[in-house]
Image: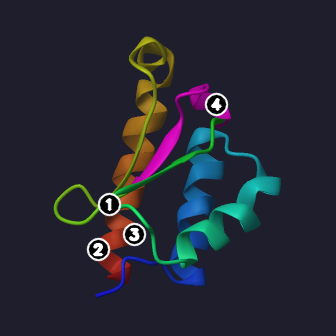
Amino acid sequence: MSNALTWEQASLIFDILVEECGAEEPMRLEFVRYHMTEPRYFPTEYRFIGSLGFGGKFWHANGRDGWYVTCYQEDNTRAGEKVKKANERLAALRLRLT
């Protein structure tokens, strides 16, 4: 089973990162291409920064964790709601697409 994402999956994930976490649109193509290739290591992480600060990362993992975002603990106070909302949307998207 491949761990690579499709173009559609990666693009829809990035939509959520833009809308909920302030990821910058010019990063979309790099993000999509990165996730369309079979990862050398799994789970993968992708630092998109956005409004979550330097620790803003998207994680792609199998099992119950699936797709989710995190930020540094010190940024969680101001970004916690963004992370929560993004993770709710990512979980719903994953259920719909996989």
Q: Residue at x 82, y 55 (%)?
A: 26
Measured in 3D between alpha carbons, the distance from the residue under mark 1 to the one under mark 4, in whole angstroms, is 20 Å
Q: Residue at x 58, y 40 (%)?
A: 21
> Which residue, given by chain and number where applicable, does mark 4 sit on?
51
| Residue reaching furthest to the left | 64
> Which residue, given by chain and number where applicable, does mark 3 sit on?
93
In x, y percent, where is residue 43? 34, 58
> Which residue, given by chain and number where applicable, does mark 2 sit on?
95
Q: Are marks 1 and 3 in contact (CB under 8 Å)?
A: yes
Please state the extent of the stretch shown in magenta in the rendering. Answer: 50-59
Crowding near pointer 4: few (<14 within 10 Å), some, many (20+)?
many
Query: Which of these two is toward me, 80 or 65?
Result: 65
Q: Under tag 4, what secondary structure? A: helix
Crowding near pointer 2: few (<14 within 10 Å), some, many (20+)?
few
Q: Under tag 1, what secondary structure? A: helix
First in sequence: mark 4 vs mark 2: 4
> Which residue, given by chain and number where applicable, does mark 1 sit on?
91
